[in-house]
Image (cartoon, helix red, strand yellow):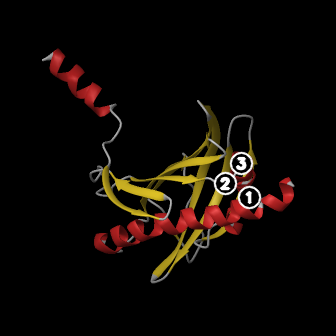
Amino acid sequence: MWYLLLALSSLADMPPVFEPMHEAGDCAFSRSAPQDDGFPILRAECVWPELAPEQLDRALGDWGGHQLIWSMVHSSHLIEQRETDALVVHVHTAPVMVDREILLRMWVEDVPGGRAYRWSQADPQPPAHEGRMGVDRDDGSYTILAEDEGVRVIATLHYDPGGSIPDSMVRWFQVLGLPRFLEELRIAAEDQETILD
């Protein structure tokens, strides 16, 4: 019996397998099987030869400026900057959906060839303000790697907005949402070019 428990524990720690969905522009999109909450982890890998890693570092590293990058982030309020991470309140807006609010823990990790900007739901999670709903899950990362003269961006997103939104609508939104998030990030990074010159 003990060897079965060890095997199950080992399987639980394995990274998800991603199934290709489609390609658009310089990005390839894939998703995992549905997780315990019923939603897949979304993944994208993009190569942007026109951008430098420093441009993306500048855009992503401003924890309190995410509303300047992504149209669906209504506000990004830095609550506390700590030595190894930060606490940030995000308010998310989308059509036919009550605004969502979540306290996120955000941090940066050095990885071979670049940096990873990661976030996850902070614990404990305060109640959402009146007129908003809490988010059940928001985990993800943007990994920025040097690629010849440009960058390779690997994005993951596992998002469950909570509430009574039909699962089919959430999945539809997620599939269309990740390409939009990446295009908005690319545009925001391009705007950093004048600062670098």
Q: Is residue 41 left or right of residue 1?
A: right
CA separation, marks 3 and 2? 18 Å
Nearer the N terminus, badge 3 or badge 2?
Answer: 3
**Coordinates of residue 15 in the picture (x, y in percent):** 36, 36
Residue under the point 68% across and 67% down: 67
The residue under label 1 is 64
- Up the image or down, 148 lies above or below 78; here it is above
Residue in the image at 79% along x and 59% along y: 193
How far is mark 1 from mark 3, CA to CA? Answer: 14 Å
Look at mark 2 in the image and give the residue it sits on: 88
| Residue 77 lies in quadrant | bottom right
In the structure shown, which secondary structural element does the residue marked by tag 3 occupy? helix
Asked if residue 134 shows in the view, the reply is no
Mark 2 or 1 closer to N-term?
A: 1
Q: Which residue lies most toward the top here?
A: 2
Q: Which residue corresponds to mark 3?
A: 57
| Three-letter code for the amino acid on which mark 2 is drawn | Val
**Helix, strand or loop at disc 1?**
helix
